[in-house]
């Protein structure tokens, strides 16, 4: 049985959310701070175990939550995706650095797995939550310096989008002996801007 090695420390009673106006990718944040309802400005990265612990190992990634459309928008498109994250330098003695590297982390432009759903006017109405989930199987090794997607899928409101296996774009020259070889982050995109658009994430973890 796979052992969970990294967890964004969220669950059904302690979720994180993004939303609001704009059509750019909105990355789920780190766990909210001490003020209730105030999310961290830093992205919610899950970092791959370093020091060769994950070198050549099959990594399982899981994330899930729900979303809602802000009003009766005709044919809104919602996209959920998992993105690779690289660092500008190696950081020693980091431990679990989910909330530490906002200024030195770069999110890849190509999603590892991605899926979209299109709703017609009235089908996805304001105030109604719709479920989403994603999973991916990844393996990376320091000899090649590359990472591969073995399998993956995104399901939004019952619409399943499987991913094709292959090399993960944006991850190369990986040094798996580094304390933090690379990371992952989940993002959501709304095709139509609305201040009431929102998405929540209740689980995001990585296992070996």
Image (cartoon, grey):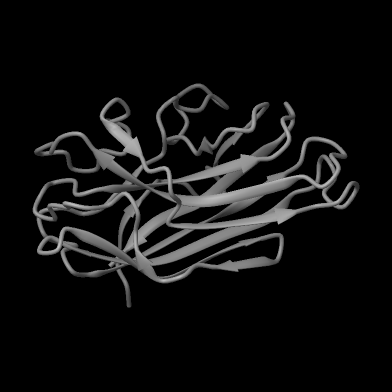
Q: Residue furthest bottom?
A: 1
Q: Tell me where residue 132 appears, x and y as whole percent.
A: 62, 57
Q: How many marks?
A: 0
Q: Which quadrant of the figure contains the C terminus? A: bottom left
Q: Which quadrant of the figure contains the N terminus? A: bottom left
Kindly identify the residue that appears in the image at 29 percent across and 34 percent down: 105
Q: Nearer the viewer, residue 173 or 52?
A: 173
Position of 117 with respect to 86 (left or right) is: right
Q: Tell me where residue 22 appears, x and y as whole percent.
A: 65, 28
166 lies above or below 170: below
Kindly identify the residue that appears in the image at 12 percent across and 52 percent down: 175
Q: Nearer the viewer, residue 48 or 3?
A: 48
Q: Nearer the viewer, residue 29 or 148?
A: 148
Kindly identify the residue that appears in the image at 22 percent across and 70 percent down: 57
Picture quarter containing residue 196? top right
Position of 51 with respect to 24 (left or right) is: left
Q: Tell me where residue 76 appears, x and y as whole percent.
A: 77, 45
190 lies above or below 132: above
Picture quarter containing residue 17? top right
Position of 193 with respect to 199 (left or right) is: right
Q: Tell me where residue 18 appears, x and y as whole percent.
A: 58, 35
Q: Nearer the viewer, residue 118 or 45?
A: 118
């Amino acid at each position: 049985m796979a052992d969970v090695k990294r967890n964004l420390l969220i669950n059904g009673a302690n979720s994180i959310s993004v939303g609001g106006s704009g059509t750019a990718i909105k990355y789920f944040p780190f766990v909210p701070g001490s003020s209730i309802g105030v999310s961290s400005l830093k992205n919610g990265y899950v970092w791959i175990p370093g020091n060769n612990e994950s070198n050549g190992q099959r990594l399982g990634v899981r994330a899930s939550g729900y979303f809602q459309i802000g009003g009766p928008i005709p044919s809104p498109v919602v996209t959920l995706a998992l993105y690779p994250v690289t660092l500008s330098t190696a950081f020693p003695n980091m431990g679990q650095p989910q909330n530490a590297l906002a200024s030195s982390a770069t999110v890849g432009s190509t999603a590892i797995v991605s899926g979209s759903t299109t709703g017609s006017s009235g089908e996805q109405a304001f105030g109604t939550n719709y479920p989403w989930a994603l999973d991916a199987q990844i393996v990376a090794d320091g000899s090649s310096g590359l990472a591969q997607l073995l399998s993956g899928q995104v399901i939004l409101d019952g619409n399943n989008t499987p991913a094709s296996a292959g090399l993960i774009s944006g991850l190369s020259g990986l040094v798996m002996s580094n304390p933090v070889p690379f990371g992952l982050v989940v993002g959501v995109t709304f095709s139509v801007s609305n201040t009431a658009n929102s998405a929540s994430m209740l689980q995001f973890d990585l296992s070996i």
